[in-house]
């Protein structure tokens, strides 16, 4: 019996691989220092002993665990470990690995190794990897596959990214509605069933889906019963063109394990299983977290510096432009600042408070949008609430900061301007915090991506403007 | 046959409920304008007709869909719709609802309604809701339950939040290893099996787990086969004290549908199923997104303004303190600024660029940490890479901003100071962006929560300091 495959065990695998690599490096270095025949001997030893051990270790790893080890290693060592795996294990690990790591390793394979690996894969995994392949390699593999598998892989690759079609599997168990359960058992005996299997799909003579027969019904009902009587017709189905994230929400909401995929005529064409959906949810969540921080694409933790720098340029450029524009607002008031330099010291506080509270509002609204809870009917209610919160907070914290400014500079009017500016910028941040995600959402953009930049730009500019304009009017 | 229960259908449900509520409000308003007997009649009509329709609509909703509708409605209407549901549906919807909404609705129920609802729930759901109940109500319900269910609910409630014990179900199907498959079928016939079922667990005479019998083996193997021969012993198991998020990772990694939960003597005590795990993953992801924005707790989109304001105070206070401290750095250079006011205009750009690129590094490191890919072995490599990226970006964008400052103010030395400050602050942001999440992680804190504040504080203070100190040294 295996015990829990916990984090600790996974960490242990990584440490063992790293220890083997370490020893490999030490022996290689030794070999490089030596000269002549001794050097060759040592080198051969280093290779033979350690690589054999590494190969054995890699062979014992679950593909998902190997993917984890690969993701945790820098470039050279990653490739070394990868080449120790057998072709099939390589392919399965690539399916599990992060996209950036997958692409790097695919690039590192020779054409022969690539083909040897791809030929070992089942069509679902092949279709999944095919997206990342160079055009000619893809075609060469398809030619070497049997006809059915090739046509499946081709049709899969044709589904757009993020569609149900791209995630579904063709491995479906179906039964005709007019059979008995006993007959179903006979048909299943000796077959290899796809996992996880929670239902057998019921079809008519033209392969049109009629219902689903949950496995618990198969296990508990009288074998003499007819499939049509034991099946349920309340089935959540998808079509290949459905969006994968909507399917994922349905899986969460209705606790699905698998669901049939049907074409426009209702014919059963595949099945969507929870493992593919969970992988999809995780990848999406990671992409979103990175995009929120302005990383253009998936970035390998150990990518070359040049690639990483380019990955961050767009965001840096956008950020520089917005920061520059906000700074031009200050530029309008340089005379006012020259008259009272304390303004330069205090103005970033007003801007910063607005940005931070605004981002809280943005986070709430984005969550509401992604759960579908924010709509035309309740926007006004939501805005009213956020405005009340900002006025409340503005009164409390504006007073605190106003008092601090008064004490610091012994200047009561300056304190009053500070308090007023904090209050007003919090009100601005509430309005913008509600409006920006809604506008992005209505424009069909992902609100998680651009909302924070737009909001910070507005609260910075408005924070500087409100504070300095009030100062010009009442102080200098 | 049901078709796809897509977002559209869900939105449709919400719109229908909202339309019913709208009509209810109009009739109520009419009734309030009228006087005397006509008023009473209208009011009665409003209540009877519309509530009956609402009740019917609510009765037709899946509990998860009802939870969605409840989350999307403001306070009063939320309660009105909730009270139209039958006790059992109420409880099931509460299990699915967001924590903040759940607590508000639980508070709104009378003692009798609460008990009526809880008595209808199955023990797993009851144990789940029990955490949110007032102590005395919980005990009253436990007293009214049958003994086994009560002891289960009690022991469940004893498991700490976020443990496998808190998510597991007691609804387990097990079989003795010495039986035949045919005998297993006899035992299963007519029973109600838990869903999703992907395996029957195999135990010995003392209920110690020996293996698992996948349902596909049950369906495809010869009925004469012995359970012990058909079972697999390679089973991922958990104990009730295991952390739920580690279990969730194992579910993702090994594509599990269910896993047995065993006590310290190896006895089977429950089962953890993928639907509970998916719900847990979703809740955690939402909590994290909100916490990253500094929301102290789960916040209902329509919470009263006062509650929301308090929910955001801690963060606002932290933010004010850090912004205040950063502004004191500027305070040290007020004389320098008085000598060249352009410094006040340009300094927020240096601070902002550092903060934004630093947050990109933080996002990458946090993801690496949460996937377990960042460890002592590769920290130096990672830091080296981030430093290279920051120097590259600093050279490129520092030059761009230096040129802009030179053109704007016709001041070449000012441009040079700007370029140098951008470069140096990007280097600072790379070091801090790698260090902060690592330090928080090693201190046992969630790096997603505090990293951004700490980083922004450092890059702001250092940005102001570097820029103004360079200016004092070379310009004024």
Image: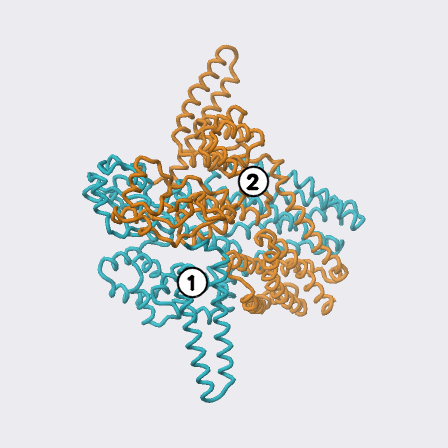
Chain colours: A orange, B cyan
Residue at the (55%, 51%) spot, across then down: B452
Please identify the residue farthest to the bottom as the structure is shown. B36
Q: CA distance from mark 1 to mark 2?
A: 39 Å
Q: Secondary structure at mark 2?
A: loop
Q: Nearer the viewer, residue B264 or B208?
A: B208
Question: SS of the residue at dot 1?
Answer: helix
Task: List the residue tagged with mark 2.
Answer: A299
Residue A48, given in percent of the width and then of the height, sits at 44, 19
Looking at this view, is B360 or B215 the one in front?
A: B215
> Seen in the image, is B2 located left or right of residue A189?
right
Query: In the rendered image, is residue B269 in sight?
Result: no
Judging depth in this view, the residue of A174 and B108 nearest the camera is: A174
Provide residue B125's location: percent of width, then percent of height: 33, 58
Q: Position of residue B423 (x, y in %)?
A: 67, 42
Q: Is residue A176 left or right of residue B296?
A: left
Q: In the rendered image, which residue does mark 1 sit on?
A: B66
Mark 2 Cα-neighbour bin, 10 Å: few <14, some 14–19, many ≥20: some
* Image height of B223 relative to B35, above or below: above
User: Furthest residue to the top?
Assistant: A37
Residue A135 quadrant: top right
Q: Position of residue A229 (x, y in %)?
A: 31, 52
Chain label for disc 1: B
Where's the C terminus of chain A, which quadrant?
bottom right
């Amino acid at each position: 019996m295996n015990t829990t495959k916990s984090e600790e065990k996974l960490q242990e695998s990584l440490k063992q691989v790293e220890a083997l690599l370490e020893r490999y490096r030490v022996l290689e270095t030794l070999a490089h220092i030596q000269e002549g025949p001794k050097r060759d001997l040592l080198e051969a030893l280093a290779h033979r002993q350690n690589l054999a051990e590494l190969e054995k270790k890699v062979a014992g790893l679950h593909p998902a665990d190997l993917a984890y080890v690969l993701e945790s290693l820098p470039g050279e060592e990653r490739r070394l470990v990868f080449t120790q795996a057998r072709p099939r294990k390589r392919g399965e690990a690539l399916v599990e690995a992060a996209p950036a790591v997958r692409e790097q390793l695919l690039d590192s394979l020779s054409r022969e190794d690539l083909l040897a690996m791809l030929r070992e894969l089942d069509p679902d995994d092949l279709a999944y990897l095919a997206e990342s392949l160079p055009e000619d390699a893809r075609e060469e593999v398809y030619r070497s596959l049997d006809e059915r598998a090739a046509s499946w892989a081709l049709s899969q690759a044709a589904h757009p990214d993020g569609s149900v079609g791209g995630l579904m599997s063709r491995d479906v168990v179906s039964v005709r509605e007019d059979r008995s359960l006993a007959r179903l058992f006979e048909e299943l005996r000796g077959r290899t069933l796809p996992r996880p299997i929670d239902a057998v799909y019921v079809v008519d003579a033209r392969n049109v889906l009629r219902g689903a027969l949950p496995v618990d019904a198969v296990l508990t009902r009288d074998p003499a019963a007819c499939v049509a009587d034991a099946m349920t017709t309340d089935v959540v189905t998808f079509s290949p063109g459905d969006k994968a994230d909507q399917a994922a929400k349905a899986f969460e909401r209705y606790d699905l394990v698998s669901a049939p995929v049907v074409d426009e005529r209702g014919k059963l064409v595949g099945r969507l299983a929870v493992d593919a959906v969970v992988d999809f949810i995780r990848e999406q969540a990671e992409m979103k977290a990175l995009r929120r921080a302005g990383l253009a694409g998936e970035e390998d933790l150990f990518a070359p510096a040049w690639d990483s720098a380019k990955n961050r340029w767009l965001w840096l450029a956008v950020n520089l432009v917005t920061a520059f524009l906000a700074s031009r607002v200050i530029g309008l008031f340089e005379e006012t600042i020259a008259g009272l330099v304390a303004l330069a010291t205090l103005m970033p506080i007003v801007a910063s408070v607005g940005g931070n509270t605004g981002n809280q509002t943005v986070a709430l609204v984005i969550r509401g949008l992604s759960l579908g809870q924010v709509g035309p009917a309740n926007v006004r209610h939501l805005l009213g609430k956020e405005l009340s919160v900002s006025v409340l907070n503005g009164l409390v914290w504006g007073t605190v900061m106003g008092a601090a400014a008064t004490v610091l500079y012994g200047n009561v009017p300056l304190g009053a301007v500070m308090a007023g500016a904090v209050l007003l910028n919090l009100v601005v941040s509430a309005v913008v915090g509600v409006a920006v995600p809604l506008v992005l959402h209505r424009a069909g953009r992902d609100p998680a991506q651009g909302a924070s930049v737009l909001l910070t730009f507005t609260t910075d500019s408005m924070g500087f403007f409100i504070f300095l304009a009030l100062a010009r009017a009442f102080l200098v």
